[in-house]
Every structure is written in structure tokens, then in C-alpha cells.
Image: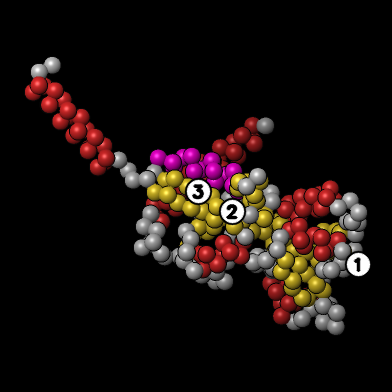
Amino acid sequence: MTTFSTLKFATWLLFLSIASFVYAEPQYRVTILVDESYPPYSYVNNGEPAGIYVDLVQQAIKLIDDKYIVELHPVPWKRGVAALENGDSFALIPPYKHIKRRPFIWPYSVPLLEEVVVAFCNAGVSLADIESKDTTANPINVGLNAGYMILDDGLEQATKQGKIRLWENKDTYSNIIKLAKKRIDCYVNDRLSTLLGLRSVKRLHPELDLSHIVEDRIVLRRTAHIGYVKDSLNKFPYKHDFIQKMDEALQTVLASQAIELGNE
């Protein structure tokens, strides 16, 4: 190859390199916060995020990895909510829609799953008819996971009237322990998460009697989502594009799982 041809070939390679750099889509690094203490939906296993929602989102991430490098970062729930409220973080898994009470979260992703929130109570205590009875002399002590707003209108009204007293505890495990030891009368949370928590407590603490804990009342049904910080386009310029692509990817993943379940 002549010197001129060699130089021409090198110039051509340089042009291709520059062109591919100019026209290639940019890669963004995106961090999504994940509740670290909400099994089976999201939790930490051997230092890594795990759970039903984590699995769904990780499958969706693979469908958009040509443009986005996404990291799921486990945090305590209240810290994650505060990070969005302060505009410090981009997104959080898995809030319910509370548009008025959490105006700093918008928009929400397509639904991940529907959860059924129920009250588990000690035998002899009931929230089922709280609207029609007066317990103000001895309010019913109700445990919640810290930062979770999951009461229906009836229970919220009962709280305002002093019929029930709310106690926020760290997580499902902490609430079940207090329920088993009768330090609280009832515990309100997702049904599946609570049932798994009861199983875990029974295994870890066989000395505790859980037989007096019964499901008492369906409180509400809510869909869980990825919640995104409102505005903050200067800090997260990719926001709208990411949400669109993630929603499309989630719908693909959810549809494929529905088909698989239907074929079983």
C-alpha cells in the first residue's frame, strides 16, 4: 500500500470514528431509589436489591440499556421519600399514588402490581366497625410502616376522632413483633408482605404465640409504581424520554409475564 493510500485509509477510519461518536445516542446514568424493607416486593438480599418489583424493573432496564445505565439503590423508605421531596433524587420504588399529599412526586409509571392493604389485629380487637363505635376512652393502637400512608377514609376519620392511635415503626418485622407482644392492637399493611413477615417471625421467634393474630379488615387496594421527582428538568434533562421508554419497557415485561402465566 502506498504512503498516500495509507494516509487516505487512516483518514477514512478517523472520519468513521468521529461520525460514530457524533451520531451515537448518549448514555445516561440513572439512579432509582428502592425501599429496602418491603418484602416480597423490594428488599435487600446479600447487599443487593431484590424482590418482585425489583425483578420487574430490572427486566425493563435490559430493554433500554442502549441509552440508559440504571442503578437501583436500596434506602430506608422515609429517606427515599425525603430525597424526592428535596429534589435530590430522580425516582423511587414503589409508592402508591398520593398526588395531593405528595405533590413533589410526578408523574408515576404504569402500574407494577395491585396490592391489597389489610388490617391484622389481635383477637378481640377489630377495626371492621370502627366508624360505628366509640373507642375514644381506650383508643385502638394501630401500627404502620414508617412513611407509608395507607389508611382509607374511615380509618383516617377515626384517627382524627381519637378512636385509634397511630404508631409508625421501622418495618414489617418490627410491627409484627409489637403486634405479637400486644404492644399494638392492629397492624395495617399489604397482605402478602404481612403474611410473609408472620412466617419469618414464626421461624425466627418460635417462642412467640402468633395464633391470636387474625386478618380483620380490607383497608384498600392500590397500585404500586415508580414515582418520579416533579420538575427538576435542569438536574434530570432526560426525565421525559426516560419515563416514556421505561413505561414502554415495563408494559412489554408485564405483558410477557401475563402471557407466560396464561400458558401455565
| Horizontal relation, residue 53 to residue 126: left or right | left
Local crowd size for mark 1, using a 10 Å CA cut-off: few (<14), some (14–19), many (≥20): few
| Horizontal relation, residue 17 to residue 91: left or right | left
Please state, as top left, top right, bottom left or bottom right, where the N terminus lies in the image. Answer: top left
Residue highlighted by disc 3: 71
User: Which residue of the protein is positioned furthest toward the top in this rendering?
Assistant: 1
Magenta segment: does it hold 255?
Answer: no
The first of marks 1 and 3 along the sequence is 3
Which one is closest to the eye, mark 1 or mark 3? 3
Q: Nearer the viewer, residue 223 or 52?
A: 52
Residue highlighted by disc 1: 124
Measure the C-alpha gap from mark 2 to mark 1.
Answer: 38 Å
Which one is closest to the eye, mark 2 or mark 1? 2
What residue type is disc 3 on? Glu
Question: Marks 2 and 3: CB-CB under 8 Å?
Answer: no
Local crowd size for mark 2, using a 10 Å CA cut-off: few (<14), some (14–19), many (≥20): many
**Image-quadrant location for residue 188:** bottom right
